[in-house]
Image: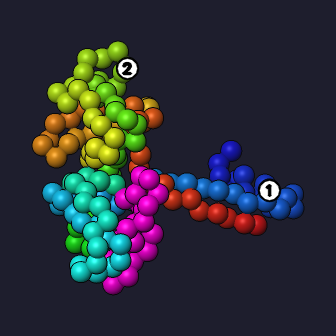
Amino acid sequence: MRLGQSVALLISFGVATSLWLSEVWGICIKSGQANLRGRPSATKRVSWVVGRYMPLGELERQGRWIRVRDLDRKEHWVHKSQVTSSYQCVVIKARYANLRTRPQSGSSLAEIPFADRYTPFKKIDHDDEWIQVEDGAGRRGWLHESTVWAPVRSVRIEY
């Protein structure tokens, strides 16, 4: 049964409830480094300096500034010239993660054998529960999806 059919079925029976939907959604830092700020202005305090491919969840736009949420659910502002939505990015959420040459736990370690928490990557491909990633130097490897974070937006639908 598809989502639309499920919603229609619940409505037809008069069931009052809420439905939560989530989708992978976000923007990525596209420059080598970007200053995240506490307020939407280049003169405001820098709250975090992040590297290329850092994923951020977009919350709102205000002129040329975007309010974003990071892995730790902290909010910042970033200038729109520093980000892109033309590709997806992930960041290590675990203390560290092993990168593999193939999408299997037993495969050999990749050229980058491991990455620490907050290491960002560009998402290249996926295979079941594995994500192929690339770092800023173009080196690739496979990460298990349980070790990474990508922005997720929840949408509540009430009927």
Residue underneath mark 1: 10
Q: Could one spot residue 101 in this view of the protein?
A: no
Q: Could you say where residue 52 lies in the image, as x and y percent from the top left?
A: 21, 54
Residue in the image at 34% along x and 61% along y: 27
Dot 2 falls on a residue whose secondary structure is loop
Q: Earlier in the sequence, mark 2 or mark 1?
A: 1
Q: Could you say where residue 131 lies in the image, as x and y percent from the top left?
A: 35, 36
Amino acid at pointer 2? Ser
Q: Nearer the viewer, mark 2 or mark 1?
A: 2
Taking depth in this image into account, of 103 and 71 the one nearest to the observer is 71
Instruction: Give the crowd class for mark 1: few <14, some 14-19, many >=20 residues within 10 Å.
Output: few
Residue underneath mark 2: 105
User: In what quadrant of the picture does the N terminus appear?
Assistant: top right
Question: Of all residues shown, which one is farthest toward the left?
Answer: 137
Taking depth in this image into account, of 53 and 96 the one nearest to the observer is 96
Q: Is residue 104 left or right of residue 80?
A: right
Q: Quadrant of residue 107?
A: top left
Q: Could you say where residue 146 lies in the image, as x and y percent from the top left?
A: 45, 35
Q: Could you say where residue 147 lies in the image, as x and y percent from the top left?
A: 41, 35
In magenta, the rendered stretch is: 56-78
Q: Quadrant of residue 111?
A: top left
Residue in the image at 33% along x and 79% along y: 40
Q: CB under 8 Å between callouts 2 and 1? A: no
Dot 1 falls on a residue whose secondary structure is helix
Q: Main secondary structure of the magenta part?
A: strand
Amino acid at pointer 1? Leu
**Gap between marks 2 and 1 measured at Cα:** 41 Å
Q: Is 4 covered by the magenta stretch?
A: no
